[in-house]
């Protein structure tokens, strides 16, 4: 009954319902979703001639509209009910920060980070009957035993917190990622004198998933030994088994700028390639036996063998969500072959998308979902009118080039919407990288990995194959570097609004239209708004200040009509990640910023200066002001470096800065702490004033207040960054009375180990009637001062999604002891 294009439309409507649910700020009640699901299911699956609502519709169009609405409702309610089940397995706020004793299994391959490992832990037993611990935890273990492996059963003391990530405009949504992965609490393994020691109960638990990861751990160790210190060892490991943890930040930047990052893992392309190779091999062997042909035909054997080979390769990749998506897509095609049906390409694509959403309703939040389905859709759409190229010479090459061009053009709106950049060198880079990685590097790496377990001859041969794969990839990396040498090779653009993305998608459809479509180049007009859309900017005389959510650290962006300034650059998270590259730079690119006019690094502490090097490498910087010496490696690459000294004045466009601390004499004191040397700067645009404080202690606060009073200068401000994240060692009565801000901003990490902000300091701000806005509760906060007044935007509240961890009671009130003002 549902033939032609109706069935793909129904499946697409189901996916649209799933997408709509993921945009909700709060989940509808479970009982309401259950009723909606029952009604939608009845409308879809009860024979239409017996459905009164449909019988009342006299026209076919009305019937189809009713069916599509039912499909949307079914997708919406299904995703909502799944979300209710997932969120029900939650850690209570009262159990956060408590030491709990649990028993469970190391469920994933541990990832090494400096002196710690991170791994997933499947909980089997909780020894505190009052606490509910979620079934799936993400744990960090500092200085772990070297024998920590998947499938081991351990008894551990853990300190947990609810899933929470940083919440920033244009930033990565870690909470959505954890929800999709089923991680409902994260924490650390407690060791030391005050905690019960970890106990390994069982060396190997016979469970399928952990044992697969145990085998992957053994394979990773063999690969690392065979490849040694070679430059691109992490890439070869990623191609063999999907473990991308060792790839450096610089390498990822290169792969993203050339558009080949989809190849640097076990991607859908590689899984499809392996499945196809296994299918061809199985079909060729099956055809040789007449007895076997009487059991099943070759096409069925190929389909079953291909899906089996793809499944085995997905297990090697760790059975991650992207691998699951690819396997489900292959499964739709294999099922069609086995059932001997010939659905249209649109039906296959829509069925695969619907099946992925059934399996994982949160897949629509991942960039890979849109990029993979978008690429296939572009190829099918562009080739639908000319798939029969014949056998003339060069036909296969022309079809391959046409498919590459279709993907390159058709993915432009998606890549700009997701990544905020377009790789102009991407078509050239991919034309070389796709065949080289897929048909040379990956086969050599897989063959070498397979031979490592076959004695000394196998180890020697496997090692040589792995070295060959690494050398070929090193040559490819050299070529990619050449591709990015021209300044035009990639373009970073501000993320445009959704209507321009929709218009650009229609424009790409016009450009790629098969057959004799009239005036195909007219599609370029539909792409223009996406590239020419003007980014909202402060008007002359306005000031926009954004306190980003960088975790336990400080990073503030000041924007005027003619300049952008940065105060502090956030923390360094690991050797390959910091707030400069992960938070501040993406935000600046989203805003269309191409240059930083002034960079102020208050002092050298890692939580304030951790991202400085990344920003200096990513953007041209006009001048740098800091208490850090100009020759410090932290400021390598900076051209104009000035030392903060009280009384100094400078400007970035219309933003005027006055340095209030430290005094010049402090640099002669060898025992002066970095906090005492913190730059304190008053920023001003017209009548709008912001006090930027760093980690200045109480004594220096009082000194700058006295110095300003004696000079007859006011330090009043509309907004003040709470010194030292609200630590007890700062925010003195003298400073609060002198500044009298309308708001105070505290940038702190969720449940940080310093217990910032201090409960006494919060009470002090409250006594002065100063609202405190905390990044751990509100995410990034933006203040916009203009002639029309002041507006404020809180990302965790104003852009809320149902999975966000919402503000609770002040965290400082829950922690009565511990380290408070260290550093």
Image (cartoon, helix red, strand yellow):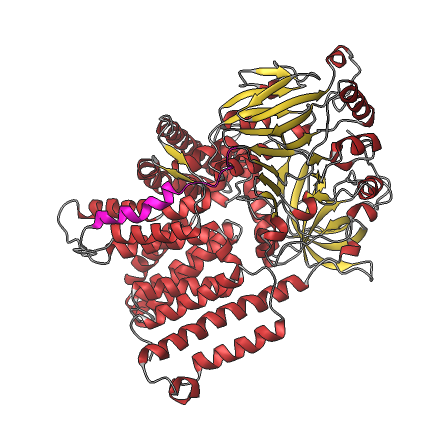
Q: Is residue 304 left or right of residue 562?
A: left
The image shows residue 254 at horizontal and vertical percentages of 44, 32
The quarter of the rendered structure image containing the C terminus is top right
Which of 587/661 is in front?
661
With 215 as the anchor, is 440 left or right in this view? left
**Horizontal relation, residue 449 to residue 98: left or right:** left
Counting every numbered tag in the picture gives 0
Q: Position of residue 447 (x, y in %)?
A: 42, 42
Instruction: Report which quarter residue 307 is drawn in.
Output: bottom left
Which residue occupies 67% across, 27% down?
682
Q: Quadrant of the N terminus?
A: bottom left
Q: Position of residue 66 (x, y in %)?
A: 41, 77
Q: Answer above or below: position of 483 versus 103.
A: above
Residue sticking out furthest to the top: 668
Q: In the figure, residue 632 lies in which quadrant?
A: top right
Residue 534 position within the rendered picture, expressed as x and y whole percent measured from the top left: 42, 41
What residue is at 50 percent from the left and 50 percent from the top?
Answer: 316
434 or 575: nearer the viewer: 575
Q: Is residue 526 magenta?
A: yes
Residue 144 in sight from this viewpoint: no
Q: Is residue 100 visible?
A: yes
What's the magenta bit mostly, secondary-structure-wise?
Answer: helix
Q: Is residue 354 above or below residue 376?
A: below
Residues rendered magenta in the picture: 520-540
In the rendered structure, does residue 13 fall within the stretch colored magenta?
no
């Amino acid at each position: 009954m549902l033939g032609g294009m109706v069935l793909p439309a129904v499946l697409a409507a189901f996916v649209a319902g799933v997408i709509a649910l993921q945009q909700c700020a709060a989940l509808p009640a479970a009982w309401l979703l259950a009723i909606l699901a029952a009604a939608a299911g009845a409308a879809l699956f009860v024979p239409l001639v017996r459905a009164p609502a449909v019988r009342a519709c006299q026209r076919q169009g009305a019937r189809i509209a009713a069916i599509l609405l039912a499909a949307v409702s079914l997708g919406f309610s299904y995703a909502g009910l799944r979300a209710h089940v997932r969120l029900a397995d939650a850690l209570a706020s009262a159990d956060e920060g408590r030491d709990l004793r649990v028993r469970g299994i190391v469920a994933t391959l541990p990832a090494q980070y400096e002196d710690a490992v991170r791994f997933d832990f499947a909980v089997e037993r909780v020894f505190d009957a009052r606490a509910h611990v979620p079934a799936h935890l993400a744990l960090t273990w500092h200085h772990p035993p070297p024998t920590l492996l998947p499938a081991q059963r351990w008894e551990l003391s853990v300190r947990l917190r609810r899933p929470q990530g940083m919440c920033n405009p244009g930033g990565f949504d870690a909470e959505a990622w954890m929800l999709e992965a089923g991680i409902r609490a994260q924490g650390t393994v407690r060791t030391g004198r005050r905690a019960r020691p970890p106990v390994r109960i069982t060396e190997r638990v016979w469970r399928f998933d952990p044992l697969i990861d145990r085998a992957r751990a053994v394979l990773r160790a063999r690969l690392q030994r065979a490849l040694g210190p070679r430059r691109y060892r992490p890439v070869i490991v990623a191609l063999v088994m999907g473990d991308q943890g060792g790839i450096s930040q610089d390498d990822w930047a290169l792969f993203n700028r050339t558009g080949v990052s989809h190849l640097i893992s076990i991607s859908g392309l590689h899984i499809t390639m392996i499945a196809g190779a296994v299918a061809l091999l199985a079909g060729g062997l099956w055809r040789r036996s007449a007895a076997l042909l009487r059991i099943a035909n070759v096409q069925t054997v190929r389909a079953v063998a291909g899906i089996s080979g793809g499944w085995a390769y997905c297990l090697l990749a760790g059975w991650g969500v992207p691998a699951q998506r690819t396997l489900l897509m292959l499964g739709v095609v294999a099922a069609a072959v086995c059932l001997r049906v010939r659905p249209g390409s649109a039906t296959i694509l829509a069925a695969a998308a619907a099946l992925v959403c059934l399996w994982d309703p949160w897949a629509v939040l991942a960039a890979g979902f849109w990029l993979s389905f978008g690429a296939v859709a572009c190829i099918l759409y562009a080739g639908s009118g000319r798939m029969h190229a014949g056998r003339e010479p060069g036909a296969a090459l022309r079809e391959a080039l046409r498919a590459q061009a279709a993907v390159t053009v058709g993915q432009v709106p998606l890549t700009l919407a997701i990544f905020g950049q377009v790789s102009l060198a991407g078509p050239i880079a991919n034309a070389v990288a796709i065949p080289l990685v897929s048909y040379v590097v990956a086969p050599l790496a897989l063959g070498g990995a397979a031979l490592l377990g076959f004695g000394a001859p196998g180890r020697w041969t496997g090692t040589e194959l792995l070295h060959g794969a690494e050398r070929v990839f090193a040559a490819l990396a050299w070529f990619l570097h050449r591709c990015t040498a021209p300044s035009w090779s990639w373009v970073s653009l501000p993320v445009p609004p959704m209507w321009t993305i929709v218009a650009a998608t229609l424009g790409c459809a016009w450009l790629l239209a098969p057959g004799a479509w009239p005036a195909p180049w007219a599609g370029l007009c539909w792409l223009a708004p996406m590239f020419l859309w003007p980014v909202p900017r402060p008007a002359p005389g306005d000031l926009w200040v954004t306190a980003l959510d960088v975790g336990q650290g400080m990073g503030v962006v000041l924007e005027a009509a003619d300049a952008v300034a940065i105060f502090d650059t956030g923390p360094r998270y690991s050797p390959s990640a910091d707030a400069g590259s992960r938070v501040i730079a993406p935000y600046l690119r989203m805003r269309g910023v191409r240059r930083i006019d002034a960079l102020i690094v208050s002092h050298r502490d890692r939580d304030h200066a951790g991202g400085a090097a990344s920003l200096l490498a990513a953007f041209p910087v006009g001048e740098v002001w800091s208490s850090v010496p100009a020759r410090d490696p932290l400021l390598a690459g900076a051209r104009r470096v000035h030392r903060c000294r009280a009384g100094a004045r400078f400007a970035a466009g219309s933003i005027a800065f006055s340095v209030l601390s430290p005094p010049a004499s402090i640099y002669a004191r060898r025992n002066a702490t970095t906090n005492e040397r913190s730059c304190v700067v008053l920023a001003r645009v017209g009548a709008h004033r912001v006090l930027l404080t760093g980690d200045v202690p109480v004594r220096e606060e009082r000194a700058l207040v006295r110095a300003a009073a004696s000079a007859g200068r006011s330090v009043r401000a509309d907004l003040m960054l709470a010194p030292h994240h609200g630590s007890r060692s700062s925010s003195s009565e003298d400073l609060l009375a002198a500044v009298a801000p309308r708001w105070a901003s505290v940038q702190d990490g969720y449940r940080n180990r310093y217990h910032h902000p201090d409960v006494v300091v919060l009470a002090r701000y409250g006594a002065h009637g100063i609202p405190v806005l905390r990044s751990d509760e509100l995410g990034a906060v933006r203040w916009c001062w203009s002639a029309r007044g002041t507006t404020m935007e809180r990302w965790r509240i104003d852009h809320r999604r149902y999975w966000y961890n919402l503000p609770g009671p002040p965290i400082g009130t829950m922690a009565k002891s511990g380290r408070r003002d260290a550093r």
